[in-house]
Amino acid sequence: MEEDLDEGQTQKGCLECCIKCLGGIPYPSLIATILLYAGVALFCGCGHEALSGTVTILQNYFEVVRGPVDSLDVFTMIDIIKYVIYGIASAFFVYGILLMVEGFFTSGAIKDLYGDFKITTCGRCVSAWFIMLTYIFMLAWLGVTAFTSLPVFMYFNIWTICQNTTILEGATLCLDPRQYGIVPIGEGKTVCAGSEKFYKMCESNELDMTFHLFICALAGAGAAVIAMIHYLMVLSANWAYVKDACRMQKYEDIKSKEEQELHDIHSTRSKERLNAYT
């Protein structure tokens, strides 16, 4: 009987511990972190592969040749963008962890307000700094989203031209990378309908796959923007809660100090009366 009672208390203690741990998780920050990681992973992974597919299309169908090492051509720009993608993936992996930790500490500060935990000025400054930094990153991701929409528009035009050649027979439709600034004006790399390269490119998997990969990268950048907005709402709410908690904490400190002073005054008067009677 006693063993069953001890076992029931143990299970109850584990259940209360699990509920307490689950209650301490900042779910809004967790959702924003998952959305940020998903968006960044989608943007970086699909963007990297789409850039590689772009290099293949330019080399195989438009016969664009990589220039010297010192020259800044389209292939060099693509390599630079790939390195930027590596940096974005690493930076926002760390930044998501930092925001998640900030959410844990802010939730703990609010829930343990009446305990031994004290909200410091440094903690409020860190929250304000994260709000400012997240706002800057949100604007940066808006720029990345706008930049990613450019190759989507370019590949949509190419895909439309490929579709129109099957509908409009005898139409003279050409693809010229000079229109998009990919190759210099002096180099003619035009591929027109009716040529063998044009049909191979339109029927190839590289064009279709690269187009859809850029669309997925655009969706990932949009998800990252939504995650940044979600983070801004969470951080702003946490900042407001912490600010109110600090005011409440100051009020409790002043109240306890006044109560202590009243208690000391009452004790002093009681001693004076006792001394007067004696």
Image (spheres, grey):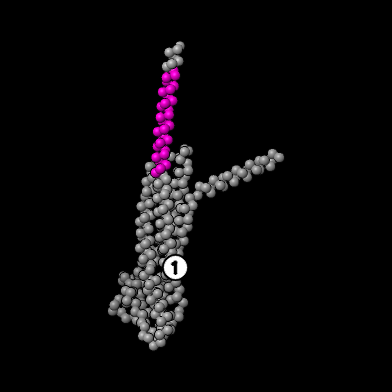
**Placement of the N terminus among the 4 image quadrants:** top right
The residues colored magenta run 243-271
Q: Position of residue 129 (x, y in %)?
A: 36, 50
Q: Quadrant of residue 214?
A: bottom left
The vertical placement of 47 against 249, above or below, is below
Q: Residue at x 31, y 70 (%)?
A: 72
Asked if the stretch drawn in magenta spans residue 267, the answer is: yes
The one of 93 and 22 positioned closer to us in this rendering: 22
The one of 182 and 72 positioned closer to us in this rendering: 182
Considering every residue shown, the one lying at the far bottom of the view is 170
Q: Residue at x 36, y 82 (%)?
A: 174
Dominant secondary structure of the residues highlighted in magenta in the image: helix
Q: Position of residue 273 (x, y in %)?
A: 43, 16
**Taking 7 as reference, is 273 left or right?**
left
**Placement of the C terminus among the 4 image quadrants:** top left
The one of 45 and 272 positioned closer to us in this rendering: 272
Asked if the stretch drawn in magenta spans residue 80, the answer is: no
Q: Position of residue 244 (x, y in %)?
A: 40, 43
Considering every residue shown, the one lying at the far right of the view is 1
Which residue lies under the disc numbered 1? 216
